[in-house]
Image: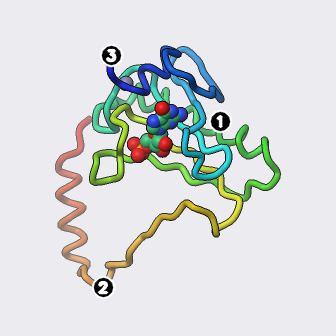
Amino acid sequence: MDDCIFCKIVRNEIPNTVVYEDDDVKAFLDITQVTPGHTLLVPKKHVADIFEYDADLAATVFSRIPKITKAIKASNPAIQGMNICNNNGAVAYQSVFHSHIHLIPRYTADDSFAMQFGDNSADYTADQLQAIADGIHAQLED
Ligand code: 5GP
Ligand code: ZN
């Protein structure tokens, strides 16, 4: 992927601030620093989003999360928590189409990061929920 910005970061063709790197993944500071220490974890292999992962790639990439998140937390005693976000598709706020996982340390709830989970539970009967679950279950692959 010659024109992919994260492939260029993986290849060190553009400046980046590396936090962790091995044969399969790279973690570097997000340029926007939503909070101090905001880090992106990417597979070195170009995949656009979660729908292009197989189980082995997911195991490889996601297995690095505890090591890196613990290091981020240990790096600053003011860190109280961490959001781990993976946006897939423009509708889900993905803007760089090389899969990446945001590791966002939280120092206070009153910062420039926010997530909102609306509560639509009153709109669903148990049968409707079951129908949704059945539809997903029917699509599961081995
Ligand atoms: P997304 O919106 O796709 O979930 O997140 C993409 C992230 O990539 C954004 O948080 C953005 O700040 C970050 N980003 C975009 N371009 C660069 C860059 O050139 N260097 C770094 N370090 N981060 C970038
Ligand atoms: Zn890429």
Label 2: state its secondary structure.
Answer: helix
> Which sits earlier in the primary sequence, circle 3 or circle 2?
3
Tell me where residue 74 sits by quadrant: top right
Tell me where residue 17 sits by quadrant: top right
Of residues 122 and 104, the one nearer the viewer is: 104
Graded by Cα atoms within 10 Å as few (under 14), some (14 to 19) or many (20 or more), the crowding at tag 2 reads few
What residue appears at the point 48 percent right and 14 percent down from the top-left corner?
11
Percent across and percent down for residue 82 are: 63, 53
What residue appears at the point 35 percent right and 25 percent down from the top-left corner?
4
Say which quadrant the N terminus sits in. Answer: top left
What residue appears at the point 31 percent right and 32 percent down from the top-left corner?
48
Of residues 48 and 31, the one nearer the viewer is: 31
Q: Label 3 vs label 2: CA separation?
A: 48 Å
The extreme right residue here reads 77
Residue type at mark 2 is: Ala
Residues tagged 2 and 1 counted as in contact (Cβ below 8 A): no
Say which quadrant the C terminus sits in. Answer: top left
For residue 84, the mark is none
122 vs 129: above or below: below
Q: Which residue is mark 1?
A: 68
Residue 103 visible in the picture = yes
Label 3: state its secondary structure.
Answer: loop
> Which sits earlier in the primary sequence, circle 1 or circle 3?
3
Percent across and percent down for residue 2 are: 33, 16
Is label 3's Cβ within 8 Å of ligand 2?
no
Between marks 2 and 1 in the image, the one whose residue lies nearer the viewer: 1
Q: Which residue is mark 3?
A: 2
Q: Which residue is mark 2?
A: 122
Percent across and percent down for residue 139 are: 18, 46
Q: Is residue 52 left or right of residue 69?
A: left
Residue type at mark 3 is: Asp
